[in-house]
Image (cartoon, rainbow, N blue to C red):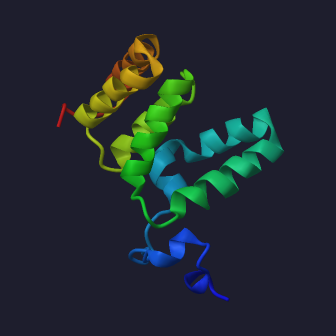
C-alpha cells in the first residue's frame, strides 16, 4: 500500500507540492552559505555521530521536505532557537533566514512573537543577537 492509499497517513490527503529542482543548492548549502565547511567541521569536532544526525536528518531530510518552503522553515528555526535560549546557534539560522529570502523586519516580527510565548528575556536576547548578526554581515540588508 502506498502512502497515498494509507487512510492513517494524514499526508495521503495532501499533495506533496512541487518537485524540487535537482540543480538547486540543497537546504544545508542555502542556509549555511559560505560558512558551510566551517560549520560542518565545528559540528564534527563537537561529536561526529551527532554531526551526522544534524547533517543527514535535520538538513538533508527534514529541511528538504516538501510542504514548507525553506524561508518558513528558517523563520520557525529562529523562533524555536530563540525560545530555547540557544544563543550560540541563532546566528546561523538568522543568516540562513536572510539567505532564504526573509527580511530583517520579518525576523524582528518573529522575535516579537517569541516574546508572547517564551518571554521577554528570551526575545530581548535574540533581538541583540539579530542586531549583532546583521551588523557583522558584509553587506547588511536594510529592514526590507
Q: Nearer the viewer, residue 139 or 127?
A: 127
Q: In this rendering, is residue 115 above or below 81?
A: above
User: Where, by quadrant of the figure, is residue 110 drawn?
Assistant: top left
**Residue at the image point whose x is 56% and y is 25% from the top:** 84
Q: Position of residue 14 (x, y in %)?
A: 44, 74
**Residue at the image point whose x is 50% and y is 25% from the top:** 83
Q: In this rendering, is residue 47 above or below 31?
A: above
**Residue at the image point whose x is 44% and y is 10% from the top:** 121
Let me know if residue 22 appears in the view: no
Question: Which quarter of the image is occupied by the C terminus?
Answer: top left
Q: Residue furthest front?
A: 7
Q: Residue 10 vs residue 1: left or right?
A: left
Q: Nearer the viewer, residue 82 or 88?
A: 82
Let me know if residue 64 appears in the view: yes
User: Where, by quadrant of the figure, is residue 88 drawn?
Assistant: top right
Q: Residue 11 vs residue 20: left or right?
A: right
Q: In this rendering, is residue 98 above or below 65?
A: above
Question: Which quarter of the image is occupied by the N terminus?
Answer: bottom right
Q: In this rendering, is residue 68 above or below 111?
A: below
Across the whole image, how many numbered discs are drawn on residues? 0
**Residue at the image point whose x is 46% and y is 16% from the top:** 122
Q: Position of residue 129 (x, y in %)?
A: 42, 20
Q: Nearer the viewer, residue 4 or 87?
A: 4
Q: Residue 93 vs residue 55: left or right?
A: left
Q: Position of residue 97 (x, y in %)?
A: 38, 43
Amino acid at each position: 500500500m502506498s502512502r497515498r492509499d494509507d487512510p492513517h497517513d494524514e499526508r495521503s490527503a495532501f499533495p506533496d507540492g512541487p518537485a524540487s529542482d535537482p540543480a538547486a543548492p540543497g537546504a544545508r548549502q542555502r542556509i549555511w552559505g559560505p560558512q558551510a565547511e566551517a560549520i560542518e567541521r565545528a559540528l564534527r569536532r563537537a561529536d561526529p555521530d551527532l554531526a551526522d544526525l544534524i547533517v543527514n536528518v535535520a538538513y538533508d531530510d527534514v529541511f528538504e521536505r516538501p510542504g514548507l518552503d525553506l524561508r518558513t522553515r528558517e523563520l520557525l528555526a529562529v523562533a524555536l532557537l530563540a525560545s530555547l535560549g540557544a544563543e550560540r546557534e541563532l546566528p546561523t539560522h538568522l543568516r540562513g533566514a536572510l539567505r532564504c529570502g526573509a527580511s530583517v523586519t520579518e525576523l524582528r516580527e518573529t522575535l516579537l512573537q517569541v516574546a508572547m510565548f517564551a518571554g521577554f528575556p528570551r526575545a530581548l536576547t535574540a533581538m541583540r543577537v539579530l542586531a549583532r548578526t546583521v551588523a557583522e554581515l558584509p553587506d547588511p540588508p536594510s529592514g526590507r
